[in-house]
Amino acid sequence: MGSIIQLDRLRKTFPGGVVAVDDVSLDIEEGEYVTLLGPSGCGKTTVLRTVAGFESPDAGSIYLAGQNVTELPPYRRQVNMVFQDYALFPHMTVSQNVGYGLRIAGMPKAEIADKVRKALDLVEMSDKGERQPHELSGGERQRVALTRAIIREPQVLLLDEPLSALDANLREAMRVELRHLHQRLGLTFVMVTHDQTEALVMSDRVVVMEAGRVAQSGTPAELYDHPSSTYVASFIGTSNVLRGHVAASGAKDITINYGADHLKAVRNGAAYADGDAICMTIRPEKARLLAGKKSDAKANLLKGTVGETLFHGNSARVTVDLASGDTFMVDLMLPNTAAQSDLPVRGTAVTVAVDPANVNTFADEAAR
Amino acid sequence: MSNRVKKLLKSTVAMTAASCIFASSAWSAGQVNLLTWEGYADDSFVKQFEEESGCEVSATYVGSNDDFAPKLAAGGGVYDMISPSIDTTKIMIEAGFVEEIDTSKVPRFSEIYEKFSTADGINHDGKVYGVPFSWGSIPFMYRTDKISEADAPTSLKALWDPKYKGKISLWDDKSSLYVAARVMGTMNIYELNDTELDAAKAKLIEQKPLVRKYWSTAGELVDLYAGGEVWISNTWGGYQSNLLAEKNIPVKEFIPEEGAEGWMDSWMVVKGTANTECVYKFLNMAISEHGQCGMSNYNGYSSSNPVAAKKCMSPEQFTKLHQDDPDYLDSLLLWVNLGARLEHYTNAWNAVKSAN
Amino acid sequence: MRLQTRKRLAAIGVLSPPLLWALVFLFIPYLIMFTYSFYLKKFPTFEAAFQFGNYAQLLLDPQYYQVLLRTAKISIMVAIFSALLGYPFAYFLVFKIRSNRMRALLYMAVIVPLWVSYLLRAYTWKTILGSEGILNSFLVTTGILDKPTDIFLYNQFSMVLTLTYIYVPFIVMPAYASLEKIPRNLIEASKDLGVRPLRTFWSITLPLSTPGIAAGMTISFCLTFGDFIAPILVGGPDGFMIANVITAQFGAALNWPLGAALSIVMLVVVLTIISLSDRLQRSGKLEIA
């Protein structure tokens, strides 16, 4: 296994001076399912289109299976794309759409028919080969687009917001289906989405982009548990962000001054000097509420009073107004029906407990 | 027949004018509405008539003799007088578009050339239907700077001469058949039988590769000469040659050995006119010195009343317009109504144009 | 029920002026024309009758189908040349011009001449193509020709040229609209599937813009088919077209019944072309080889 795609310091500026892609380097392993995640305008789609060959970068190079393809036109790259709104040819049937590339390449008719049938079988569309695209449902079009893209056995499959045009239920089903397809085909998938759930559920690796740059790249768990910036922390899931200063750093953990409190966090490899401004992110579901006088010697403790309580069915989100003035969210899982009645009421004095392992730290970019 | 400007523009003007006339007071007294050639209601002589007679003159212009019948057939009551040429007058009578003229109310009618006043075209069942107004010839014309004096054409054969290939033009009219018949020595051009017509048609089709363009308006022929497209063609005597002289294009008219056609226009009264009084005032004015010289001065055509012409023209003009030359008049093959043969002529001419 | 009646009345109220207009100015005149086509020519005018003599004459006299064929030939040439000029131009505007302002400007440059009188534009070609015209002066001055030629004007070439020039905008407009409507990602998808640009054009862009081309060609064909001015202005002795024959029948020949019959034949030809083109446009798809 080596890297199938290498992006080396890609840069793309659009007319009008908008820097869409700013010095992006990225290695994608063969067989990986990588998702580029970010809000619209962050440059993720431009990166994808550059890989496909629809945009040529101002600077930097693209390697596909070790070959520099930066200057190659799209029709000479062994990648295929699933377009956001599928881009099915309206004047062709499903079979003609799927077989289009093969037909132009001059493959014998019988062979094409055979391949198309098998490919459509794979997505359970073989009975709809003679339909026109406009006769299909959204999900069916999606599958045709997928089939058309994979039938040429590309080195990489690019997916541009593949699920965004589907309704919520179908989207969820297709997530699973795409994931299965990826496993079955063993192909490299590079997907673009602005939907963090999609990214977390489907990918092996997520690349979060911000304003044309890579903000952070890692497995979904790494990104979730150890975001390296407030941007990533807030883009993926919900986080409590607390700001403090490094009081002491030990071999395994560091101590942080936060208001009047001293909080401990497990070291994550970053080197801090004493007095450095530091950001802590804590996921709401990874904090606990200690009722009354209860205590927990191993955990960081923050005192406050209950503000809002929002009931979510399987959980409840409690907002705690900390003594420091910050607001802190705690998610309480509600495994027992009886637990509902135990939800804290506004104004109750509570203590928030967070294990040091659940305190993610990074240098405070706002203070730099 | 007179100043024919662009047929297309004309018909629009005619329609607009017709509707305007209708919308205003077409029925009130003190009016006379003409369907005529452009130069026949020119302010240069009509203005004074309006002031003296109290009759307001409105004119709608035609571009061709073929326009009279369709316009009158399309609906009456709009026009009081028309001025078709001698080959069209009979059709107007037979179609019932015009009414008898009481010559006792036109005292100077007797002064008109007898050849005209007794012409078959305006006399029907012993009644008079037209007052002759003007006349002229259809001579031929060539550019003297392109065709030398030594080569000066005298015969219609020049129009079939390959050395003028692409520089020849003919009037887009059934009269082309008259030309073709004469060049083949058939002189009864208004009584061609089917065989003779077919021969004329074939002769014209044979000529087509030599023809630059068939001209349909006076302006077009002038442009064709001025643009160097055409060196030789037929023309309306006196009219286009004057216009070309103004543009310093040297042309010369000639009457070919095979003779030239002649034409004569008459005023006719539309059946059922409500403006009889003004109509007769206009008729009398038309053949008076005022009307005759007014027309001749503006259009360059000859007058139908030599008595009046003699009084109002200079001797030079009188001679130039052949007013004192009965032989010239007699030498012209005066247009006649083709009657039921018209259809065969027009068909033959259309067939020429349709031929590949 | 009541509401429905009111709605229906409202619909009638809204639709009746255009319907009335169509009835009075389209259907009734056509009906009159149709009726006239069975009338009998009787010198000097014609009389009411019901007979097929006029249609028989159209069939039997070769001059009519000669002119019909010539008119069809010229119309087809104009439609084809208009498409050959107008379509690439529209393609260029839609796909090659990046600046919106430049695109709007070039589009207007094609459309604006439509506001200039047809006569004037046809006349302009006379001054260009004439024996002493601009083109000849250029060719003689540059020594390409040693004396002016008259092959440019007063023939079918100059008619096709003038009419093509006049009807190109009628191709550019629908072709532009249909090209602009093609989603860009279809073209990208084709390239993505390994298809080169030229092949992509033949397989995707061209078939998807066919309705626009067909609409434009239909318009220019039909307008040419009914044209009677170009033959008069720039046509030569061999430029007589069907509309000129009709004009002659209603004028010089005083044969309204024959003119009416010719008009009906012409109407049938044009309506056939329009309905064929309509079917092509509606099917909206072509088999891709």
Image (cartoon, coloured by chain):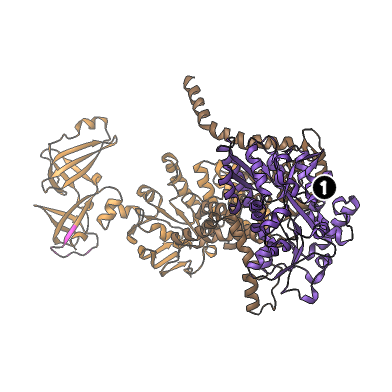
At label 1, the amino acid type is Leu
Placement of the N terminus of chain A among the 4 image quadrants: bottom left
Q: Is residue A208 left or right of residue C247?
A: left
Residue for point 54% across, 65% down: A76
For chain A, the rendered hue is orange
Residue for point 23% across, 36% down: A310
Of C63 and A35, nearer the camera is: C63
Circle 1 residues within 10 Å: few <14, some 14–19, many ≥20: some
Judging from the image, what secondary structure is the residue with disc 1 in?
A: loop
Residue for point 24% across, 62% down: A269
Q: Which residue is mark 1?
A: B338
Q: Is residue A90 left or right of residue A23?
A: right
Identify the magenta region. A270-278
Q: Which chain is purple?
A: B
Q: Is residue C168 left or right of residue A80?
A: right
Placement of the C terminus of chain A among the 4 image quadrants: bottom left
Residue B187 on image: x %, y %: 88, 57
Q: Is residue C204 visible?
A: no
Of A19 and A174, nearer the camera is: A19
Residue A79 on image: x %, y %: 51, 60
Is C32 situated above or below C83?
above
The chain letter under disc 1 is B
For chain C, the rendered hue is brown
Q: Main secondary structure of the magenta part?
A: loop
Residue C260 on image: x %, y %: 73, 41
